[in-house]
Amino acid sequence: MISVEDFVRRYAVDRHNTDSVKWDGMDELFGTNDLLPLWVADTEFKVPEEVTEALKKRIEHGVYGYSKTPDNYYEAYCKWQSERYGTEIQHEWLRFSTGVVQSLSTLVNILTQPDDAVMILQPVYYPFMNVIKQNDRRMVISNLKQDGTSYKMDLEDIKNKIEENHVKLFINCSPHNPVGRVWDKEELEALLELCRQEKVLFISDEIHHDLIVGEKPFTSVLAIKDGLYRDNTVMVDSASKTFNLAALQNSHVVIPNPQVRERYDHYMSQLAAPAGSIIGKIAAEAAYTNGAEWLEGLLQVVRSNYGYLKKSLRTHCPEAVVYDLEGTYLAWIDLSAVIEPEHLEYILKKKAHLAVDFGTMFGKTGKGFIRVNLATTPANIKAATAALLENIQG
Ligand SMILES: Cc1ncc(COP(=O)(O)O)c(C=O)c1O
């Protein structure tokens, strides 16, 4: 297997002046481009060579006329899902979209009516809140329960709120951004069973499912109990987070239920909506076909960066709590015992010169936390850790 050092040597690149939101677009949110960016969830690593080769071949052809999904795409994606995770996906369940967030918004429109209640668990990736509010649905929140340096779902609270608010749709993040949980099979099963009994439709955003950092394996909602809950569920994912392909605008909407699929197709035809880009599909197909070893390398880097950050903070400032990381490349850190939450942004931006995501973006319960992107070079994580320690140790 490729070592951390070799992966970094081979794939790390300077992204300045490439129109990167994370590096070149920092000033819009942070007021300057001079911070060390650990915010946007993409990486500082080039894609696997096979992806670049596949793209070059297409670019050299030089024609970008109307295109269909490559025949081998379905095979590559379904094999990846089946062999790595035991998730069986039939070709006809698969639809394409330009992005997962766009699909979440589309699905909220298709599966609910204005003013219907849609439930989420907080803290959570902030576009979940946006797609509910911007489509004039009612947002119902169940807070994740803190459990040492991790989180659990509060099933009793979820059940009570579903009933009180007549919730119609549940959107779950699995693995969970920002708290880093890879949900246990049993937890997912209990949640899916509750939603089935209460007639609540379920969307599972599994975009982080290849980014398994801890020991626990990932289970898709489509695979729970041999697919018992498939009819109640839509799963969305993409190769974009795993392989750093976000700008190529290709993602999946997996809809096993034929009636829901029909409603989806009807809605998309009303919008005359585009179904992903050929460049994105070529890249993702090559990644699913040849990217497994590269992914192992990336995961080694993330594990190593996480280990370094956690050990350094525990040793030098144990009051700064780094939460367990089972999945995603995003560390969730509670700084409330070392920095007054009111001063958090000022200290991180103006003193430590770090661009991180602040916890309150993910909901009220994120107050005092930061989210740090670990999919970067060990040198960047070392520099960020040093800057953090210097400014939180008083
Ligand atoms: C849970 C989750 N869903 C969706 C996305 C973004 O997906 P897309 O760029 O395909 O809209 C992200 C990006 O960080 C994410 O964390």
Image (cartoon, rainbow, N blue to C red):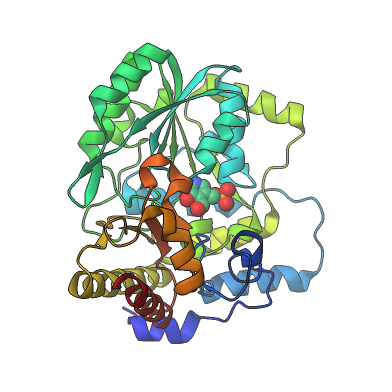
Of residues 253 and 360, the one drawn nearer to the viewer in this rendering? 360
Of residues 283 and 38, the one drawn nearer to the viewer in this rendering? 38
Where residue 82 appears, x then y in whole percent? Answer: 37, 48
Image-based side of 388 in relation to 42, left or right: left
Which residue is at a point 34% across and 52% down the rendered structure image? 83
Which residue is at a point 57% across and 62% down the rendered structure image? 245
Where residue 42 appears, x then y in whole percent? Answer: 52, 63
Could you tell me which quadrant the N terminus lies in? bottom left
Image-based side of 299 in relation to 246, left or right: left
- Count of numbered circles on the image: 0
Image quarter of residue 271: top right
Where residue 347 appears, x then y in whole percent? Answer: 44, 66
Which residue is at a point 32% across and 37% down the rendered structure image? 223
Could you tell me which quadrant the C terminus lies in? bottom left
Which residue is at a point 59% across and 16% down the rendered structure image? 113
Work out whether 357 lies above or below 270: below
Tell me if residue 355 can be seen. no
Where residue 64 appears, x then y in whole percent? Answer: 80, 59
Image quarter of residue 29: bottom right
Tell me if residue 13 can be seen. yes
